[in-house]
Amino acid sequence: MNRYNWIVVVFVLLVALLAAGLRLDPTRVPSPLVGKPMPPFSAATVHAPQRVVGDGQLPGPALVNVWASWCAACHHEHPVLLALANDLRVPIYGMNYKDRREDAVAWLGRLGDPYIFSVFDGDGRIGLDWGVYGVPETFVIDADGVIRYKHIGPLDDDDVEQVLLPLLADLGAGRAR
Amino acid sequence: MIVELGHFALVLAFVVAAVQGTLPLAGAHYGVAPLYRLALPAARLQFLLLVLSYAALSAAFLQDDFSVRYIAQHSSAALPTYYKLAAVWGAHEGSLLLWILILGAWTFAVTLFNRGLTEVFLARVLAVMGLVAAGFMLFTLATSNPFERLFPAAAAGRDLNPLLQDPGLTIHPPMLYMGYVGFSVAFAFAVSALLDGRLDGRWARWSRPWVLAAWVFLTIGITLGSWWAYHELGWGGWWFWDPVENASFMPWLVGTALLHSLAVTEKRNAFKGWTVLLAILAFSLSLLGTFLVRSGVLVSVHAFASDPERGVFILLFLVVAVGGSLALYAWRAPRIRSTGVFDFLSRENLLLINNVILLVTMFTILIGTLYPLALDALGLDKISVGAPYFSAVFVPLMLLAALAAGVGPAVQWKRSSPHPLLRRLRAPLAVALVAALVLAAVFGDGVSPGVFIGAAAGSWVLLTTALNLGRRLRRDGPRGGLRSLPLSFYGMSTAHLGLALFIFGVTFSSAYSEEKMVHLQDGQSVELAGYKFVFEGVADREGPNYMSKEGRVGVFRGGEPVAVLHPERRTYRVQSDAMTEAAVDASPLRDLYVAMGEEVEGGRREVRVYYKPLIRWIWLGAMLMALGGVLSASDARYRVARRAVRADSARADGSARAGGAA
Amino acid sequence: MTAALFHAVFLSLAVAGAEPFASAEQERRYYELLKELRCLVCQNQSLSDSAAGLAGDLRDEVRAMVADGKSDREIVDFMTARYGDFVLFRPRFRPATWILWLAPAALLAGGLFWLFRWQVVHRRRSDSEPE
């Protein structure tokens, strides 16, 4: 040991940090909304322009899935949502983000509609309040309307099995498992 | 066929580098001449093979050989020839090959210019460089082979990323890599000296021109990068403190510190251990930069497509190369003895202060760059550390450096008495303060404190440098004139002058730049900083591999036409992303910068106009710094080794004489 | 037709993207704020630099808030409430960033102290074993 060894120590710490960094994804941004009540909104649904819904009309536990017809990853994720809604009876609300109503309706007609209803957010104002930055995104809402989890990007079967279903079961979602 | 030859040449080069990196080290250690004499021919053969390998890849690019995966992904038949040649380093794999080629070139240069080195020492230097080269070639061959074939071959290339189809690509990366890799020579000298156990003034004299050369290239490379980023809308302007930019700036800061401390080690035989550490650090930071840029641990606007496997490999390489050399240093450093004695108020001490400031700046940037990673790894939070943070902490440190740059050259080696020094510096200080007050008042509405301080720092460096030059000329050269002073003294003065211009450029462009983002219809105009920009419409134009909407913007001042600018909106045929090509009317005192966006509703177009005063001074200053480095490296004492040795002993006799460059 | 004549014929004023600002001060603040805020979907770009759709939305949002007379603090809080501290290029000073903000000064003090001590030690050593 001598007084120059601290240089090696600093280097080892640096390498440990870089090694840890290799396993992280720097582009994932956690939402500060997790643990907070869902941001209030009031908007029409995709299928019924006259029907106005608000944050009080999304009884949890449930999923809120942000989607758009122009979003390729949403197309990819869609079968997973359909299976969740149809086979497992998980309530899913859609939020149709920065889309055109006729495109959204056609998309759901073609691919199937897993949503109880989809809130129409044509100008992305609601998405802004919800901190949406990449579609698709999926929020888990509990019975009190508090956001418990947010998934960014398309859902796959692993996400559903390992994260969403256990969480929903914890939250007391009836038949989710 | 030519591709396989290139691949094979690279494999052979790896084998040769591995031999060059091992046997001569053993030979040097045990004193076996046939083994250590292998180093020189091996280094030359290795370079030859690398030239072949690189030429093969370039030829395949020119032939549009889309059966090579790398070429299929990063070129196309319609790409202009000069971009095909530049596309070789347009992405990860090929740029790595360029890195290795340049390392080979520096190694080759060491085999040519080594007068005064003992055979054993030269063998060690070449061996260390061979080991570094072998590591990088293994990395390339194992994870990033640019020669990999594609089955079946692609019918057409996916074209070079349109963002890179810019004159900047043709010259910025080679210059930058020349700089990064150039520090490997000083690194190899340092490691060899540690292995050798003999560190003397000659070590510093051998290292210094190599460090200067690398530093000059790095300075030019970074400056070109800055100029390119300035032209490319969306890259955050001339400097954004992006992780990749920081990765290039950190070795530059350490390289600058190394230049200054080498001056002391060479002339005064002091801070030897410290200088060796800096030589190791400069190259280590180049390697760290390679990791940061290519591993994907940080998000950057300039990053390569990354893959964690590559990250693991570079990290392992870092552990071996950097960890090994630092451990060697920690083991050997206690034996290094410096003899030079100096007072608190001495040139040596001022240069040490310079080193402390530069190193603190480097660590600050390192911490800022890695901080988000550290918080994320500890699961604390996800934050960003960007330009506003770095500017806030960097500027005060640079002001200190500017202060020291003004004092340092005025102080004598070994010992200076405070009174004459104060008398000498009083005048420039007073003039700098008054000049700053005037400049700040003339340029702005009121005197802003930031502009005042920046202008004072710039004026201070400018005046002290000029006065010092004048004083030296009066004293040393009443008859000999300009030629009586060593070139390295002019080098220092030029570089410090560059620093002054740089400070002026940064101060005024950041304080008084103006910008506007508007939507304009044909014929509409926008006013900015006393200029009127009239959007005169858009015309179609066809490029070699893109379609362009070319805008026409007339610029007027007081009704007089100033310039007509043609910002473009390009759509490349293969990768259909729209690219914004800004148009700039450049002049020494201000740039007018126009960029044009998409068409928005109502036939209007998004137009951004910028007014940037003194922005050119930033690059002009940086180029002067590089020129200063060239002058210093051309100093006679590095060119003629034998004469230098004689001068060395002469200087040792007359020790306390002030002089030379810092 | 010369450019100057062209200029004289068309003298209409620019139409900004949205509502114009009440003062030059507001306009300056708007452009400054855009440089402080990070675009979420981009590779390390500020809102000012980004061409992404979301960045455009957020620019409009900032513009509206500035024109509305909101303070910088309020605008920054609006952003972090939605996207977290990730959007700030200038991290807030809080326990997790203490090291970040204090490191430069601490390093400088440490460096200068090291320099001082190094000289004292060095001088003592060279006194005992003359050159």
Image: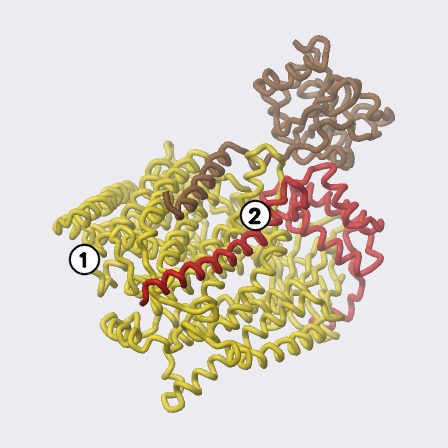
Residue at far bottom of view = B479
Please provide percent x and percent y for residue B120.
19, 55
The colour style of the image is by chain
Q: Is B319 situated left or right of A145 in this image?
A: left
Quadrant placement of the C terminus of chain A: top right
Mark 2 chain? B
Per the image, the residue denoted by label 2 is B368
Q: Quadrant of residue B661?
A: bottom left
Estimate the x, y position of residue B278 in percent, counting from the top left. Answer: 40, 55
Quadrant in the rendering for residue C20: bottom right
Q: Amino acid at mark 1?
A: Glu
Q: In brown, which chain?
A: A
Q: Of residues A9 and B229, which is closer to you in this image?
A: A9
Say which chain tag 1 marks: B
Can residue B69 be seen in the rendering of this structure? no
Residue on which disc 1 sits = B119
Instruction: Look at chain B in the picture and name its colour.
Output: yellow
The structure residue drawn at horizontal position 69% and vertical position 72%, both measured from the top left corner, is B440
Q: Is residue B317 above or below residue B653?
A: above
Q: Secondary structure at mark 2?
A: helix
Chain that is coloured red in the picture: C
- Taking the view exactly as shown, the residue that stands out farthest to the front is C128
Precedes in sequence: disc 2 or disc 1 = 1
- The quadrant of the rendering that contains the N terminus of chain A is top left
Tell me the distance, in whole angstroms, between the alpha carbons under discs 2 and 1.
44 Å
Q: Residue at x 72, y 73 (%)?
A: B557
Q: Amino acid at mark 2?
A: Gly
SS assignment at label 1: helix
Q: Nearer the viewer, residue B490 or A63?
A: B490
User: Are the residues tagged 2 and 1 within 8 Å (C-beta)?
Assistant: no
Judge left or right: residue A45 versus residue B162.
right
